[in-house]
């Protein structure tokens, strides 16, 4: 059980690691763990939209996609131009003493390879999590995220990911609660 406890503490470390791209953006902040939660929730929604995919695999891929960052940190695109990291080694070291280590390492490899439908959706969920952050900043008046959006949108691989991204961009960040509040004020009650 010691190796299990070690893995749990390692995954918990993601709460303390900031996403480094926000420094270049000049606005916003997010921990890697916050990003992983958002990405995993998006994956859940994607699995509901595409019931033919393996939902559990998709969610697992998203839950694990940034685990290596507990060891290597969050490398933004500027840093990646200068620093080489070894995610495969980081995952191997993290999972070495786990009975399910090979399965976890295989999932990490599948995410990196991006060949399965689930891995492509997981990659898109990762990008949509960033799109949500950028759109949130745009809606509160920050301009720099508008220059980032085309590059992030270009990385989307699936029709589902592109459709979700389009809906996010067409929706104001607080529409979900403003519409509910208006309905309550009009006696209609919350809901859709």
Image (cartoon, rainbow, N blue to C red):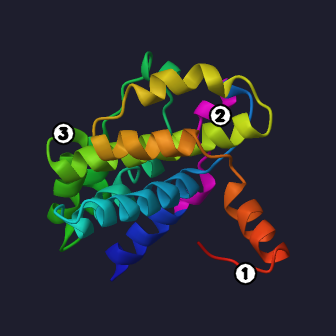
Q: Residue at x 85, y 74 (%)?
A: 185
Say if residue 96 shows up in the picture: no
Tell which of 41 and 61 is nearer to you: 41
Q: Quadrant of the N terminus?
A: bottom left
User: What secondary structure is the stretch in magenta mostly built from?
Assistant: helix
Image location of residue 95, percent across then percent down? 26, 61
Q: Which mark is residue 189?
A: 1
**CA separation in Å, label 2 and label 1:** 38 Å
Disc with the residue nearer the chain's start (1 vs 3)? 3
In the rendered view, would you say 172 is above or below 97? Answer: above
* First along the sequence among labels 3 and 2: 2
Q: Position of residue 65 (x, y in %)?
A: 35, 51
Give the left or right position of residue 166, taking residue 132 as reference. Answer: left
The C terminus - image quarter: bottom right
Q: Nearer the viewer, residue 166 or 135?
A: 166
**Residue 97 forms part of the magenta stretch:** no
Q: Residue at x 28, y 35 (%)?
A: 157
Identify the magenta region.
Answer: 13-24
Identify whether 160 is placed above or below 175.
above
Label 1: how many Cα within 10 Å (few below 14, some 14–19, many 20+): few
Q: Secondary structure at mark 3?
A: helix
- Label ID, residue 113: 3
Dot 2, crowdedness within 10 Å: few (<14), some or many (≥20)? some
Residue holding disc 2: 22
Q: Which of the 4 image quadrants contains residue 19?
A: top right
Q: Is residue 125 above or below residue 189?
A: above
Q: In front: 27, or 187?
A: 187
Residue 15 within the magenta-colored segment of the rendering: yes
């Amino acid at each position: 059980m010691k190796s299990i406890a070690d893995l749990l503490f390692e995954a918990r470390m993601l709460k303390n690691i900031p996403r480094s791209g926000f420094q270049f953006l000049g606005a916003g902040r997010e921990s890697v763990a916050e990003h992983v939660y958002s990405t995993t929730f998006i994956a859940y929604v994607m699995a509901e939209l595409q019931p033919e995919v393996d939902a559990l695999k998709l969610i697992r891929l998203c839950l694990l996609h940034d685990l290596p960052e507990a060891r290597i940190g969050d490398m933004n695109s500027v840093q990646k131009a200068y620093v080489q990291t070894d995610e495969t080694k980081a995952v191997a070291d993290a999972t070495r003493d786990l009975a399910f280590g090979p399965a976890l390492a295989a999932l990490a490899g599948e995410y990196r390879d991006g060949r399965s439908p689930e891995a492509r959706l997981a990659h898109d969920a990762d990008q949509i999590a960033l799109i949500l952050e950028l759109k949130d900043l745009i809606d509160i008046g920050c301009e720099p995220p508008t220059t980032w959006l085309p590059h992030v949108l270009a990385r989307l691989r699936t029709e589902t990911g592109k459709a979700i991204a389009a809906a996010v961009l067409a929706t104001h960040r607080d529409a979900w609660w403003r519409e509910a509040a208006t309905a309550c004020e009009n006696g209609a009650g919350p809901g859709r």
